[in-house]
Each structure stands twice: as structure tokens, then as C-alpha cells.
Amino acid sequence: MKDIDRLQRWLTLGANVGVLIGLVLVVVQINQNTRMARTAYKSEGNVVANQTWTNLMGDRPGDVIEKSIECPEELTYSDFMALDAFLFTAVNMLYRDYQLAQEGLFSESDWKRSIDTYVHWYLANPFGRAWWDEEAKGFFPQEFAAYVADRLDKVRGKDSRTYWRAIRARVTGVETAPPTVCQRGSPRP
């Protein structure tokens, strides 16, 4: 009888430990599901915001971006709104990676690599930098904004236009001024 009682106590203890382990696993699963749901909601919010801004951008972002670099004095408010939409959408895509890192789904190096890869393309020209400084950097968390600003300081003079002109010169064999959308410049053919 003593052996049966001892066996019963051990079985009860084992069952209780099993229940405790099961509860811990349920809590871990609930936390993971909550994090994934939060991440999905943030991502969906970014998609909706980006679609709204894309609609505002219209069908002429290339011309407006070119005008912002070649002849910013010719920018209209409508042009500014299209540029604002383009730049917000571009930076929001980078910010998404930062958000995923905050949720533990990306590493710090992942979101920083995204910024390292794309920030010069979107923000390194004078208009993009002014837009970032005046309008956008205060919108984002300090850690994200500080890293973007640091990268921008390191890529001065290496904007998308610089790369385009270098590629154009290589392909055409000449380094002449390209046609422009500016009224003061030669119109596009």
C-alpha cells in the first residue's frame, strides 16, 4: 500500500508538472499570436497609407521628381503634394522594416541595411533632404530618424540623379546635360 501511495504521489506530481508545462506553452503561444497580430495590423496600416499616398502621387512622379532636382523654383503646390506622397511612401517602406524589428521579426541589421540600401535613392537630393528635415524626421521614432539622418550625412552627392547621369554618360559615351522637364531648360522630345 505504501508503494502504491508513493507511486500515486509521483504520478500526481508528474501530471501537475505536465499541466504546468502545458500552461507555459499556452502563454508563450498567446504572446506569439498577439505579436504576430500586432505586426499584421501595423503592416496593413502601412499598406493602406501607402495606397492613399500612391493615389495622390498620380501618374507623373518621375517628372515631378526630376523637376524637384533640376528646377525646384518651378514646383507647384500640386507638384509638392505628389513629391510628398512619393517620399512618404518610400520612407514608410523603410520604416516597415524598423517596425518588424521592433516586433522581433527582423533584426536591427535588417532595418539598417534597408536604409543603407535605399536612403540615398529617395532622400539624398536637395529636395529629399529638405523634405526629410522639415516634414518627415519628426514623424518617426528617434532611433529610426537618427539613423536615416546619419546615413544621409554620409551619402551627400550620391543621389539617384548622380547615378542616372553616370549611367547615361556611360551608355551614350557623352557627358552632356540631359533633356529636362523644366520650362527654362530644353523640353523633352
Image (cartoon, rainbow, N blue to C red):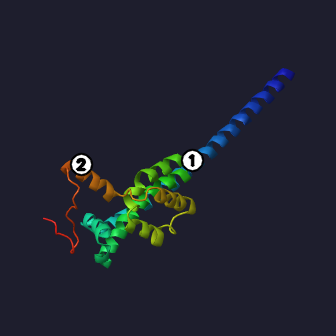
Q: CA distance from mark 1 to mark 2?
A: 51 Å
Q: As displayed, is residue 102 above or below residue 130? A: above
Write down the residue under mark 1. Answer: 32
* Amino acid type for the residue under numbered disc 2: Arg
Write down the residue under mark 2. Answer: 170
Q: Could you classify mark 1 by the number of other residues whose Cα lies within 10 Å: few (under 14), some (14-19), or many (20 or more)?
A: few
Q: Nearer the viewer, residue 177 or 46?
A: 177
Are the residues flagged by discs 1 and 2 in contact, CB closer than 8 Å? no
| Disc 2 secondary structure class | helix
Q: Is residue 162 left or right of residue 154?
A: left
Q: Nearer the viewer, residue 137 or 168?
A: 168
Disc number lying in front (1 or 2):
2
The quarter of the image holding the C terminus is bottom left
Q: What residue is at 53 percent from the left and 59 percent from the top?
A: 144
Mark found first going from the N terminus, 1 or 2:
1
Would you say residue 105 is visible in this rendering?
Answer: no
Q: Nearer the viewer, residue 31 or 137?
A: 137
Q: What residue is at 45 percent from the left and 51 percent from the top?
A: 116
Q: What residue is at 83 percent from the left and 25 percent from the top?
A: 6
Q: Position of residue 90 (x, y in %)?
A: 39, 60
Q: As displayed, is residue 20 above or below residue 33? A: above
Q: As displayed, is residue 6 above or below residue 171? A: above
Identify the residue at the far right of this view: 2
Q: Position of residue 66 (x, y in %)?
A: 28, 65
Instruction: Return the mark for residue 129.
Output: none
